[in-house]
Amino acid sequence: MTATPLPDPASPPVRSRTADRARADRQRGPSPRYLREVQRPEIREDIRTLAFFVRVNCDGNHRTLPRRPHESHAVTAGVYDDPGLRGVQAHGVPTLCQECSDHLAYGEARRVFCPLDPKPFCAECEIHCFIAAERAWNKQMMRYSGPRSLFHGYALEGAKHFALSVRRYSGTYVRRILQRENASA
């Protein structure tokens, strides 16, 4: 049995294919379909909410990393520049580390192209359009950011989210029980 060699500290860090793909997409520019879909108010609101959660996560976990304003197709489309925004939606373009910026760009694209309408919470979705690594990162990020968002001006929205998730989970739970009973009969 051979031991796996440790990475050379002098070598550059290994980057994920997702991060490389996100950077390449940003250089290409948004597609016409992206620009059309991102104009829907519910999509714009979801993207800004996701950015808020990513910012809370980045502020708490990546304080020492270099940061710069987030760059993505959503920024190009003006999602963060809507006039008349108030509260947590009015934070503007988030300032993030490179890792969080890449994850946010991926999440923005997934939200814009979500095939479900109305869109469920990603944790409850049966499609799982996020690749496994991104889904795991999002889960960790939401577990960190969710409780902390209550102290960052997101208490009312957090209460709404909790109420919706309880209602949706209870409905999902009942449906699954009924499906099992029908399948066994």
Image (spheres, rainbow, N blue to C red):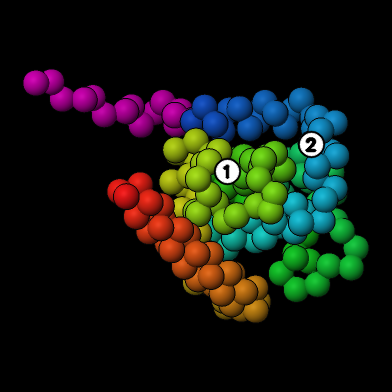
The residue indicated by pointer 2 is 34
185 vs 134, left or right, is: left
Residue at 52% in and 27% down? 17
9 or 25, nearer to the observer: 25
148, above or below 135, in the image: below
Residue at 44% in and 31% down? 13
Return the x and y of residue 83 as percentages of the image width and height.
90, 63
Q: Please tell me in which quadrant of the rendered image residue 163 appears.
A: bottom right
Residue at 83% in and 67% down? 85
154, above or below 184, in the image: below
Return the x and y of residue 106 as percentages of the image width and height.
62, 39
Please tell me how crowded label 2 is: few (under 14), some (14-19), or many (20+) other residues with Cα within 10 Å. some
The residue indicated by pointer 1 is 103
76 vs 119, left or right, is: right
Return the x and y of residue 164 as percentages of the image width and height.
58, 69
Asked if one can make out residue 108 in the rendered structure from this viewpoint, the answer is no
Q: Please tell me in which quadrant of the rendered image residue 27 appears.
A: top right
Q: Secondary structure at mark 1?
A: helix
User: Residue 95's mark?
Assistant: none
The stretch drawn in magenta includes residue 73? no
The kind of residue tagged 1 is His
63, above or below 108, in the image: below
Q: Which residues are magenta?
A: 1-15
